[in-house]
Image (cartoon, rainbow, N blue to C red):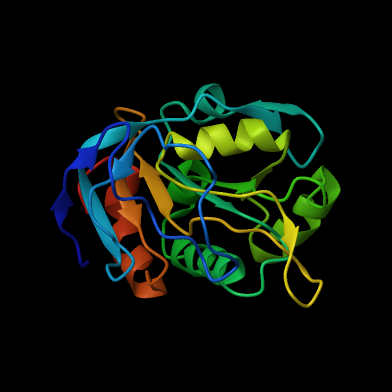
Amino acid sequence: MRNKTFVVAALLAAATLTLSACGSGNDGGKPVAVVSEDTSQKAATVLDKPFEKPDLVLTDTQGKQYDLRKETAGHPTLVYFGYTHCPDACPLTMNNIAVAKKALSRAEQDDLRVVFVTTDPARDTPAELGKWLKMIDPQFIGLTGDFSTIQAGARTLGISIEPTTKDKNGKLVSMHGTQVIAFSPKTDAGYVLYGEDATVDDYTKDLPRIVRGENP
């Protein structure tokens, strides 16, 4: 795995995580924590100061309340913010993880939590999220809810997202960071960050260690 340890900056740090090809810009607010260097050219970053898991209570694909901290406590967890109408980064990232996940043992697959939080809740209803994720991996967890709540949760991970807007061609787009954060089952802290260029091979090599709560 390609990795390097970076220091995680605190509030008001100058650098912010890059947004995906789905859009660009920033969310208009200061992130609670950000990575101190641009990680867009690196597959993964082992964080010197892990992120705290977001305190998010949203709605899952069954229409039930889902408390992220409570439901994923003690489980290796990958969290990604994106949307189902995304033309590139979101489906590629989720499919890469899904393929790599198949290399794990059945017990490890059942233990792993992969959480997809929509950045486009107006269109990504529980039913739509469920339909989209089922085609990728039925075990993946989809969450939707109030946009401001989702945006605030993303900001605690240094991930910038913006409300869905129309581009110059009138197409609805959701601008969002493309990072995947891996949380340890031992500490529940987010200690590894994957950039958009992380491949199936990167995840395949790293997931066994992530599941065990080890540094990849």
Q: Is residue 70 or residue 192 the one in the foreground?
A: 192
In screen coordinates, is 2 left or right of 19? left
**Where is residue 83 drawn, in percent x and y?**
67, 57
Instruction: Please state which of residues 104 and 176 is positioned toward the viewer in this rendering.
Output: 176
Q: Position of residue 212 (x, y in %)?
A: 29, 42
**From the image, which quarter does the C terminus lie in?**
bottom left
Count all numbered tags in the image, as a single digit.
Answer: 0
Q: Is residue 104 above or below residue 181?
A: below
Q: Position of residue 10 (x, y in %)?
A: 27, 32
> Is 212 above or below relative to 204?
above
140 with respect to 51 (left or right) = right
Quadrant in which residue 23 is drawn: bottom right
| Left-right relation of 134 to 79 | right
Residue 189 in which image quadrant: top left
Q: Nearer the viewer, residue 122 or 28?
A: 28
Which part of the image, by quadrant, shows the N terminus? bottom left
Q: Quadrant of residue 22?
A: bottom right
Query: Does residue 43 appear to the left or right of 54 in the view shown?
Result: left
Determine the residue positioned at 29% across, 61% down.
39
Q: Residue at x 62, y 36 (%)?
A: 150
Q: Residue at x 28, y 60 (%)?
A: 38
